[in-house]
Image (cartoon, coloured by chain):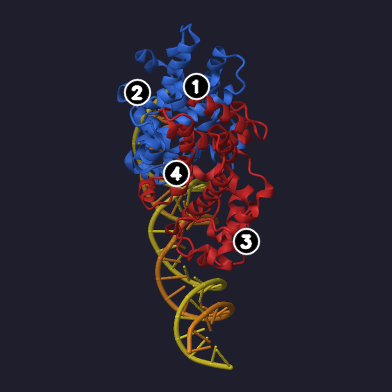
Chain colours: A red, B blue, C orange, D yellow
Amino acid sequence: MLNLLSNLRISVPESIYIKDPESSDLGKRIIEHSILLIDEIGFDHFTFKKLGAKIGSNESSIYRYFESKHKLLLYITSWYWAWLEYHLVFATHNVSDAKEKLFKAIEIVTQTIEQDMSYAHINEVALSRIVVNEYSKSYLTKEVDVENKEGYFVVYKRLITRLKEMLLEINPNYKHPSSLASTILGGALHQHFLKEHFKSITDCHSDNSTTNFFKELAIKTIS
Amino acid sequence: MLNLLSNLRISVPESIYIKDPESSDLGKRIIEHSILLIDEIGFDHFTFKKLGAKIGSNESSIYRYFESKHKLLLYITSWYWAWLEYHLVFATHNVSDAKEKLFKAIEIVTQTIEQDMSYAHINEVALSRIVVNEYSKSYLTKEVDVENKEGYFVVYKRLITRLKEMLLEINPNYKHPSSLASTILGGALHQHFLKEHFKSITDCHSDNSTTNFFKELAIKTIS
DNA sequence: CAAAAATAATAGTATTACTATTAATTTTGT
DNA sequence: ACAAAATTAATAGTAATACTATTATTTTTG
């Protein structure tokens, strides 16, 4: 399955970039090293100038791919959600038992990403840390409604919708399936953050405890 | 109760400010108008220069109260959590039934803040919108561990701990009370955001639907 | 009413997040 | 192989940001 995925192109909304970074060597280096650099110094301290220095290229060249660092963040996080979506779709395909399917899906979206899931020039472990630490900054802006209309958040919303469908499959009468789905996805990121920085307000300390917490929460809530 | 609260001083960690804004007229105007201005233009576009212009004061004078706009955000959001905590403590005090107490607490922390809860020079409705849209930016930084040690997040963590205790009162054997408490608080903010901007991935559209969603989620999860 | 404290005004800094222009290099079509 | 086109690099410049430092003025208070 990993080999199959490696040959698939993860699809990110075209409106996010000026020039497709997958179309050139420089573009791929921009993506590869922006993930490493944002993970290292944080999105707030990240600049195209610093990225240019890292990849031995010029600030102005990066601007030919992305209009701003905000768009670059949208690109890499959309890539992440699309990548997770592929994993989720493949892992749940042909699983006939609704509960088993939901549990598999929750495992995928709440797990701690590990090294061996590597894909081309992208470090998914670093990228998953970026999603935990920075994703909400991509929508907590005054421009969110305009950008939402442009389709910058479609992948994220589609993933939540898939999770919602699986919840409804178990109990078609449950009244808050979208809220529960978005709570699981958003909540998992939050628990991963708390585990690293605010240990006293989480019980998720081991690798799979976040997954177990949300599996139990989900199945009990919809029953 | 509101009158009682109006005479109580909401206590914010002293290390957050340079000079106590409650100690002068200028300080109070800084707080009052920073809340209105951040609500209006968003934290990213907010600057001390713009705030100075609004209150007819100088940028440099504001720096005598707060070292940075980040510290100002920590101040007003800590104030908000402390204010919510008072409401929660008063509302649940002397409630003997554990479930009734928890439900009252969930109402307090998940409700949409309304105009009539006004307190001195602070617009709590605007402030609650700021918490929804900006609070996570206060901890999603590379400096979070240092600032956590300085005590900048104590009020928030204490509120979650209070919620956790109430969950444990109902079921002392539940294994993830802290995670559930932090999921409720963080999740409520998230649902309020989705309601305004990403309607398709939430079912919380009316004022009390977020509260009902989390009441049901909590009681089912710990049972 | 003098001293102290608070506030305002002014100026200045390094950095950021870009845009614009031109030059050099690489790719491509014939 | 070579000219044209496209891409990338280099340079310079701008307005805004997030401050610091200094000095002047106003207000408070003992």
To which residue does mark 2 refer?
B120
Disc 3 marks a residue whose amino acid type is Lys
Mark 1 packing: few (<14 Cα in 10 Å), some, or many (20+)? Answer: many
Q: Are marks 2 and 1 in contact (CB under 8 Å)?
A: no
Quadrant of the image occupied by residue B62: top left
Where is residue D3 shown, x and y percent of the image? 48, 91
Label 3: element kind: helix
Residue A157, numbered circle: 4
| Chain letter of the residue beneath label 2 in the structure image | B
Disc 3 to disc 1, how far (Cα)?
A: 47 Å
To which residue does mark 1 refer?
B218
Give the mark, 4 or 3, whose residue is nearer the N terminus. 3
Residue A54, numbered circle: 3
Mark 3 and mark 1, same subunit?
no
Q: Nearer the viewer, residue B132 or B168?
A: B168
Asked if residue A185 is positioned above or below residue A85 in the image, the reply reads above
Disc 1 marks a residue whose amino acid type is Ala
Label 1: element kind: helix
Disc 4 to disc 3, how far (Cα)?
A: 33 Å
Mark 2 packing: few (<14 Cα in 10 Å), some, or many (20+)? Answer: few
Mark 4 packing: few (<14 Cα in 10 Å), some, or many (20+)? Answer: some
Q: Are marks 3 and 1 in contact (CB under 8 Å)?
A: no
Disc 2 marks a residue whose amino acid type is Ala
